[in-house]
Amino acid sequence: MNDVSTESSLVIDAHHHFWRYSAEEYDWINDDMAVLRRNFLPDDLIVELASAKVDGVVTVQARQTLEETRWLLELAKSCSAIRGVVGWAPIAAEDFEALLDVLAAEPKLVGLRHLVQVEPDGFLDGVDFNRGVRSMRRGGLVYDVVIFERQLEEAIRFVDRHPQQVFVLDHVAKPKIASGEIEPWRSRMRELSKRANVMCKVSGMVTEDSWSRWSIESLRPYLDVVVEAFGPARLMAGSDWPVCLVASEYGRWWNVLRSYFKNYSEGERIQIFGATSVKTYNLM
């Protein structure tokens, strides 16, 4: 694992995406999200990073195909800002372990995830999926959990089956910020946070709020919960760019995070804005 002390000043965006847009492959991008109907590639990212003073990123899958995972890994070879890739693979497949041996040989592959948020309730209880997740420890890969808040109880059961696996919860489990609902999300987040092998990304929040009316004040109750529950050492800042663009420019989101955490100690800010990501994902 990298010596975090030598990487401590890095600012890492722990969650963003790339894509070559097509209406067929990205049919979830509706008319209200028209700003996303274009390509988002490394050259676009570099401009954003420079303006927001971000040093590197963890690139996360947006399509559930091995083709995309391999494409992201190829991009990482030519773009030094990409410190790691969280890809997709058929975790529940019978031949997943053999495939895992091949994927784990890729130095920039740091984790896998499945879009559980679009699956029926009980998906994380599946025998085949859990078998695949158990095998991930062999390759030293993190598993990113992407769910809606209603799936938190299921996620807690899932995590409890794998006490030695490192998990990262994406987008603070997508609470109902726009309607101001905080329970039962708050109680379930506190319960999940009792598992020391779970980290949490402070990301994807603006798109769960009102896209046109969100503010740091509307987000604050939810930010307060995740900080109290997980603590700075298990939080990592992320943007969810370009998805965030439906509600916030890239730089604005980083300004919000820096404003919220401005009174925390330098050591705590170092953890949240980079060191936790470097350590958790063993970033290069």
Image (cartoon, rainbow, N blue to C red):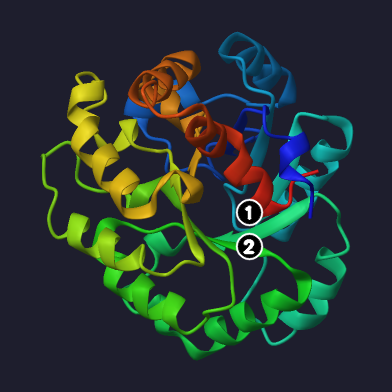
Residue displayed at 73% across by 18% down: 43
Q: Looking at the picture, how far across and down is residue 196, in whole percent?
A: 47, 66
208 sits to left or right of 218:
right
Which is more N-terminal, label 1 or label 2?
2
Q: Give the Cα separation between the discs numbered 2 and 1.
A: 8 Å
The residue where tag 1 is placed is 280
Q: Looking at the picture, how far across and down is residue 183, in whole percent?
A: 12, 55
Count of picture labels: 2
Question: Is residue 34 visible in the rendered structure shown here?
Answer: no
Toward the top, the furthest residue is 51
Tag shown at residue 142: 2
266 sits to left or right of 182:
right
Q: Quarter-wise, where is residue 55 in the image?
A: top right
Q: Specify the amino acid type for callout 1.
A: Thr
Q: Nearer the viewer, residue 241 or 235?
A: 235
81 sits to left or right of 229:
right
Q: Looking at the picture, how far across and down is residue 71, in whole percent?
A: 78, 45
Residue displayed at 60% across by 78% down: 133
Whether 260 is drawn above or below 198: the answer is: above
Pointers 2 and 1 in contact (C-beta within 8 Å):
yes
Whether 283 is drawn above or below 246: the answer is: below
Q: Quarter-wise, where is residue 146 in the image?
A: bottom left
Tell us which disc is closer to us: 2 or 1. 1
Toward the bottom, the furthest residue is 127
